[in-house]
Image: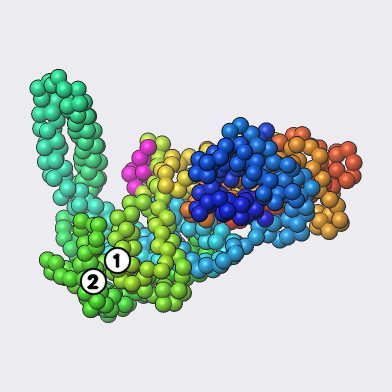
Amino acid sequence: MNILALLKARFQPVLESMSADVAPLLEMIRPAGDPKFGDYQANFAMGLAKKVGKNPRDLATEIVAATSLEDLCEPPEVAGPGFINLKLRDDWLQMQLSAAQADTRVGVEKAAESKTYIVDYSSPNVAKPMHVGHIRSTVIGDSLCRTLKFMGHNAISDNHLGDWGTQFGMIIYGYKNFVDQDAYKAAPVPELSRIYRVVRSLMDYFDAKNALPKLIEKLAERTAEYETAKNAPETSDKAEAKKQKKEVGRLQSQIKELNEEIEATKEKVAKTDDSPQLAKLAAEHANISTAVLQETAKLHAGDEENLALWKEFLPFCEDEIKRVYERLNVTFDHQLGESFYHDRLAAVVEDFEKRGLAKESEGATCVFLEGFKAPMIIRKRDGAFLYSTTDLATIAYRMETWKPDAILYVVDFRQGDHFDKLFAATRLWGYTDIELKHVSFGTVMGDDGKPFKTRSGDTVGLEGLLDEAVSRAYKIVQDAGAAGGDALEESQQKAVAETVGIAALKYGDLSQNRESDYKFSYDKMLALNGNTSTYMQYAYARVQSIFRKGEVDIDALRTSGAKIVLGHPAERQLALAILRFSEALDDVLVDYRPNYLTNYLFDQLAKSYSGFFENCPVLKAETEEQKNSRLLLCDLTARVIQQGLGLLGIQTVEKM
């Protein structure tokens, strides 16, 4: 039951008789910000009154009189200049709670119209270990997929693996030049990771060495511009003076950033130059970047040796990421990587050319799109295809195979320009009757406000991140037991710590506005207070503790005929929070934002339950009827928490 949707449906016929465009009016029906104004407020009368030439209060009264609300609400109150305050009837709330109690979906109805969604997320390069940058796409995409399915949609998850790119050229080159065969035979994955790191460090070294003179030259240019701007003659024109000051500040900022970049680049160069072993390798493999591209090109051309190595390495690499997904409790319906589409790329380019949608420019095949300065290249002058070509082939395959209504790409915001062009090219190609959405997200930052890195400047490995979270969670579980919490054996403590630690990372990410950057903090993520999974899991475990302490057979109570009666304001507030679960899920899917669900779980449900717990004794209730009513409210709360966390890909624990 979506209360907000029900209220909108009741007001809609009356509003349609007064306005041709009721959608914005219906959006002005919202949950009340303060209980003294009721449970919901309708604020459309003031704006509508101007259009129909009536007094807002009179119009609000007229609308209330014409709207069928008697079974749902107490008599509505028209307040102030024309606000309509709506308070739901207690008997109606009790009836909805009883229905939710008997429903495995706790009262959440499926969408009236089921659609087919493809959710494209995670998509790591399988040739290298997953890192912190993969956490956001993976958990956001997984949560959206779970929520879409729960709401009755056909959601298809597809992990578009990077299993065919330059990374495999790097591993192939590394295998041919640096592999320790004994180590590889004993443990393939660590050795493949090692040779990848060797190749990566050498390529980074030469990239840094080549970039350094250009950066120094750029710094000299900016410094000269800064001196000119700083010493410019003063002007009496305030606007011009402000402009000059702003320009000086801008150049100062650029100089600071360039100095930092130069220092970081010098450190990369020194890291190799100062190591006799690395310096020797660099001297022996001065053309490594070109050689890696050649190995990649040979693989793509079907070279027998490289193809055999790719087939040998791929299962090892996939097993590595599979282990991480299992710990994250993330699964996919399909994992169709770049290699799956390789044989389809030439046909994509040919079709664009045949339709006159692509043409040659400086030897490359390009799609020129209206509104974009630069074209989208789908084949380079050397005949090589690009990510854009693969993405177009992927869309064509998905449309032919699954005929989706929407494709969601859960990808870093920095790929925004790529997706803008891809979507424009897709529509130009003829796929117009589909929603294409870049579900973008920000960056995980360190304490210094910069992208999260290790002390040595390397990307933080995802598995190491999970291990640390679980280790810290284990300490919390041990401390809770020592402080008089639930008694757990060591094996139980470890199992709970694994669940709690991984949940903390996932919830910590999902509770953020996905478009914002956020600072990574184990302490905040694992806090027992505030909007954290640890707090939500504890709230669930606390309910289970009540049932154990009272020796309550909750399954029997659910079918006993016991009724929920809302006698205390805290009971009513909790009831309202429970019944707003459906609204929260609808909000998530409006713009694909899982943090709307975490906000609901904490700000509405958990806070309401806390108020209920403090004010309404459960096992020591005054009567057996009151006790059973409150036990049923506890049960519904726990079920919504469990279902809500489940849609975030997070498990609950019976004891903490």
Residue identified by numbered label 1 = 425
**Residue at position x 88%, y 38% from top?**
622
Q: Amino acid at mark 2?
A: Leu
Residue 397 falls left or right of residue 4: left
User: How many badges with numbers are in the image?
Assistant: 2
Of the numbered discs 2 and 1, the one sitting upstream in the chain is: 2
Q: How far apart are labels 2 and 1 at the CA level?
A: 9 Å
Q: Nearer the viewer, residue 375 or 468?
A: 375
Please name the residue shown 90% across and 41% down the image. Answer: 623
Q: Which numbered marker is on residue 1? A: none
- Image quadrant where residue 569 sits: top right
Where on the picture, by quarter, is residue 234?
top left
Q: Position of residue 456 (x, y in %)?
A: 33, 43
Q: Is residue 135 left or right of residue 388?
A: right
Side of 303 where 532 appears, left or right: right
The percent position of residue 305, horizontal first and vertical second, equals: 27, 77
The local secondary structure at tag 1 comes to helix
Crowding at mark 2 (Cα within 10 Å: few <14, some 14-19, many 20+) = some
Image quarter in which the C terminus is found: top right
x and y, in percent, of residue 380 in the image: 19, 68
Front residue of 29/457: it is 29
Seen at 24% across and 62% down, the residue is: 369
In the picture of the structure, the residue carrying the numbered disc 2 is: 357
**Overall secondary structure of the magenta section:** loop
> What secondary structure is found at the residue carrying circle 2?
loop
Percent of width and height locating residue 384: 22, 70
Query: Does the residue at mark 2 contact the one at mark 1 (Cβ under 8 Å)?
Result: yes
Type of the residue with mark 1 = Ala
Residue density around tag 1, few if under 14, some if 14–19, many if 20 or more, within 10 Å: many
Report the span colored magenta. Answer: 449-458
Quadrant of residue 49 in the image? top right
